Image (tube, coloured by chain):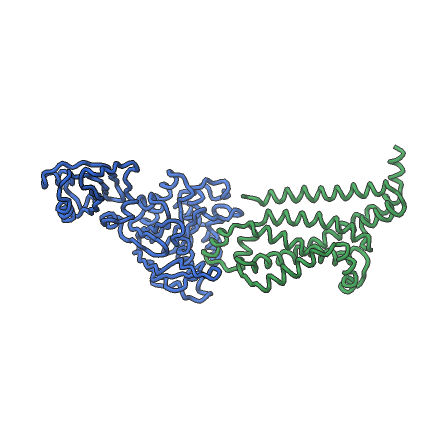
Chain colours: A blue, B green
Amino acid sequence: MITIKDLRKVYRQGGDTVVALDGVSLDVPTGKIHGIVGHSGAGKSTLVRCLTLLDRPTSGTVTVNGQELTNVSDSKLRDARRRIGMVFQHANLFDSRTTAQNVAYPLELIGVPKAEIKTKVADLLELVGLGKFANAYPSQLSGGQRQRVGIARALATDPDVLLCDEPTSALDPQTTDEILELVKKLRDRLEITVLIITHEMHVVKQACDSVSLLEAGRIVEHGELGEVINTAGSRLAATLLPLPGDTPSGEGRGPILDLLYSGEQATEPIISLITRTFGIDVNVLAGSVEQLGEQQFAHLRVQLPAGTDAAAVREHLLGIGVAVTEKGGK
Amino acid sequence: MEFLTDLLNNPGITKALWPATVETLQMTALSTLFTVLVGLPLGILLHATDKGGLAPVRWLNVVLSGIIVNITRSIPFAILMVSLIPFAALVVGTALGPIAATVSLTIGTIPFFARLVETALRDVSSGKVDAALVMGSTRMQVIRKVMVPEAMPGLVAATTTTVVTLIGYSAMAGLIGGGGLGRLAYNYGFVRFESDIMIVTIIVIVLMVQIVQILGDWLAKKVDHR
């Protein structure tokens, strides 16, 4: 549905050239929620500005529903922008307009008749659960309600893609989950493609089907949530399923392995399996088990008795779909 | 009591005060109208052509902001007014009276108002402008449907400040043939040493300013939904 191809953005800052985006390619199919995570300075904001064509990319293309948005003439640019509905971190509602008038704004621009606007706006507000707040001003709404209005406004022109730029970063945990639930509901109901740009791993866990890690203007890891977690040494996996901070190092006592697996791939109880197959005792140093989407995921750090042939254990586990990383120890 | 009776029988009050007040109101109202008509677009242009604005045009911004607005604003109003007398005569056919004074008053306050407009527009967050652009607004739509309505409380306050300034300037204009309360205070209060007339004139001007300020504050609050 949305295809980004080799997107590059180079700024000139004084005498220096700054490469903000260094060949970003991405393909999100219809009806999927894709997360793009990265630290500040990774190029997230530049990516958003290039996707909405607020900034022209230096090279590369953005295609939505078969229509290339980049390289269109200025007059067509405004129509192209309507294919992407955008949700902002701080909602960016117009304070001088009521909730209903905010949602009506994009419809006014394309000259939709007043009566039609009225029904459409009422439907949209009902959809985001704000039917009763049509005549309230943004200042009278809570942060979560404002974000709902922002979402309704972004959906007004029936876009193909909903682009959310840090949609929950200014919200408390409970409101965050409510907004993410709403996004998922809208995806199911409207079969819209969603792109969420965020620095919060929680958002990815809660809402995304797939995820990309953006670093220094490049996508360094990419894949479906289950896929990413089952990749040995994946940094995304380590941050998605972090081990408790005070994990004992267990150094000097025996080989330490980090195991990452999901319920689907690893159907057998892993610890018992190692014990039975190799006849050794396994000590669990730390662990994190979570339900992400529809699947169970586990991240365990285990220690084998000193002198165990860790390579053989590793080999065996890889064979049944467990991602293994050796953490040292002898 | 006797002081009051004297005052109420003084021709300066009975005959001259009302027409002078009307002239001042006339000058202020007309100048405000023209100042807003020209100053609002100029302020929008100042903001839009600036770096990071909707339509950055460096040379135009330098000409408008650096040359026209700043130079006009750095000339003291009394001097600007006197120097504009020939121009006013050319425009309205006479160098005397409230209408002639309106010309120099307007030219003197346009740059002042335009700067206030620019500041008010700068307070509209860039996020709102981005949102409007992303939704497919033309730049004209961004200005008319987003920036001006969002800046309305600031624009109302700017207009109030301008009206108050114009009341003050119009008194100065009175001295060089503009008429109005400035003229009255000068003729009666200063030339004829009738300090009671001077005091009454001051009271009337103070009341005018108070009423304008109260109305302006009320209106600014009414349009402010932030």
Give the quarter of the image for residue B34.
bottom right
Where is the C terminus of chain B found, in terms of image quarters?
top right
Q: Quadrant of residue B63?
A: bottom right
Give the left or right position of residue A129, taking residue B176 as reference: left
At 68% from the left and 50% from the top, the residue drawn is: B162
Q: Is residue A96 visible?
A: yes
Q: How far across and down, in percent of the image, does residue A78 sit?
A: 45, 61
Q: Nearer the viewer, residue B188 or B8?
A: B188
Task: Tell me where residue A282 appears, x and y as whole percent.
Answer: 16, 37
Q: Classify B213 as above or below B53.
A: above
Residue B39, horizontal then vertical, whole percent? 65, 56
For image coordinates 40% across by 48% down, the residue present is A166
Asked if residue B65 lies left or right of residue B13, the reply is: left
| Camera sees residue A78 | no
Compared with residue B187, is residue A23 higher up or lower down, i.e. above or below?
Answer: below
Front-most of B8 and A22? Answer: A22
Q: Quadrant of the N terminus of chain B?
A: top right
The residue most toward the top is: B1
Tally the marks.
0
Q: Image point 9% across, 41% down: which residue?
A: A277
